[in-house]
Amino acid sequence: MGHIYRTLQTLMKQAVRSVAFLPVPMIVVALGLAFLFYYLENNTDISGLTTDYFPALAITSQDTARTILGMFIGGLITLTVFTFTQIMTLLNQVASSYSPRLLPKLTGDRALQFVMGLNLASIVLSIAVLLSIRSSDDYNIPNFSILVCTILGISCLVLFVYFVTSITAKIQVGNIIDRVAQDAMNDLAEEREYSEAGYAEAVIPPELAYWSAIPSPISGYVGTVDHDTLASLGLEFDTRFYIGVTKGQYVPRGLPLLQSESTLDKEQVERVLAAVAPIPDQFDDWYLPNLKQLTEIALKALSPGINDPGTALTVIDRQTEILAAMMETPLHNVYRSKDGGEVWFARHGYQEVLSALMQEMRCYGKGDPLLVRRLFQMLYHLLQLTGDSLSYHRYLQEEIASLLRDATDNLPNPADRAILARDIRHHRKVLRQYRRVTVLDQVTQPEISQV
């Protein structure tokens, strides 16, 4: 059952980011409406009622009906071909200018899918109505069906204007950065709510080194794990589990995927793997892939072919927001079910995420004075938000020292070095003032509350 659940979940994730997610169901609905309209036209007087309410739209000639439907079909086919061509051109532009990993966000856009689906559904419905018109003297013209096709055709023309305006705005780099950053912030907000669902942050059991290892059945990426099923299996098998591979990490076939406190037989291992086995695809339905996409946009902007440091500076501002939110997000590493089952798992630590981000940004931007100054600004802003956390403070101080060494080695111009030194002195002064204000606030707050 767990294997079926995870398979359906994976298929759903693949479907929602596909261009065909809405168009295919809308085409099926159009076919259903075609059969419904055919039944209503032949068994009811719906066309007569349509003529009574809208006499100006009444059509009395079969040739006129075929001409109108043929005109809409031909025009919509041309419009659809142009739409597909424009979409492919824009997707290619995004992949080459920003990052190919951004394509699922555009192909999964619901507005884009709806416009494409409405065009295709209108074509299918119009063809079905056109085929239903019979060449006989006593045949009644399906005025109701033609009216619906006319409304859909006009709607497609109006939506085409919206589509051109919308897709042009969506591929602007500023809007892409805002969308990716907002997705990361939403994912972090969901992470903070996991505490109510049984997730917690605790010290890993010291006897973990002696637990039995369970190898990965296939080569793939660790995706969605059914922690509740694993916890139930742990209760059933009288054991606990530890997933040593972090989410999104690639694990080759045969290498350890998780560990069990008790040794399990072959059948039990198969049931466990059904809830945690890797999958072939990577998904960006959590915060870290979105943060990496922002980094890729910045690195692409810094490449000689694009040379857009302004985009990189905007990315750093949004990365500051995400890294600040990460400090407020608990690093859950254990799931405890209501029945008592327990599943431990590895997590991406803050130091790991920060170091990976800074390594890439320092490698590509250490020779750009503006970028280096903005990176120092990001790190000192984060340093102000560490509060009493000594670990976060230490991580940020280490990155500041690394960035300072790279800046010293790669900024030979004395003027640039002088400006950078002035910025660092300013950041340190602001940091000292911020801490004094924070300490004073903590001291006076109890006095205010007593009053």
Image (tube, rainbow, N blue to C red):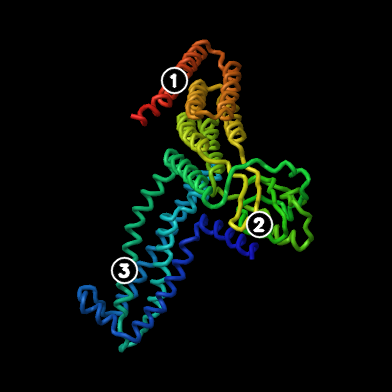
Q: Which amino acid, mark 1?
A: Arg
Q: Pointer 2: what residue? A: 230
- Is the residue marked by circle 1 packed among few (<14), some (14-19), or many (20+) residues within 10 Å? few
Q: CA distance from mark 3 to mark 2?
A: 55 Å
Q: Position of residue 17 (x, y in %)?
A: 52, 55
Residue positioned 73% across, 50% down in the render: 259
- Is the residue marked by circle 3 packed among few (<14), some (14-19), or many (20+) residues within 10 Å? some
Say whether disc 3 or disc 2 marks the residue closer to the N-terminus: 3
Q: Pointer 3: what residue? A: 150
Say whether disc 3 or disc 1 marks the residue closer to the N-terminus: 3
CB-based contact (under 8 Å), mark 3 and mark 1: no
Q: Nearer the viewer, residue 152 or 372?
A: 372
Q: Position of residue 219 (x, y in %)?
A: 71, 51
Q: Nearer the viewer, mark 3 or mark 1?
A: 1
Q: Pointer 1: what residue? A: 436
Q: Which amino acid, mark 2?
A: Leu
**Taking 17 as reference, is 360 above or below it?**
above
From the viewer's perspective, is 216 left or right of 366? right
Q: Nearer the viewer, residue 139 or 99?
A: 99
Q: Position of residue 411 (x, y in %)?
A: 56, 16
**Taking 143 as reference, is 269 above or below it?**
above
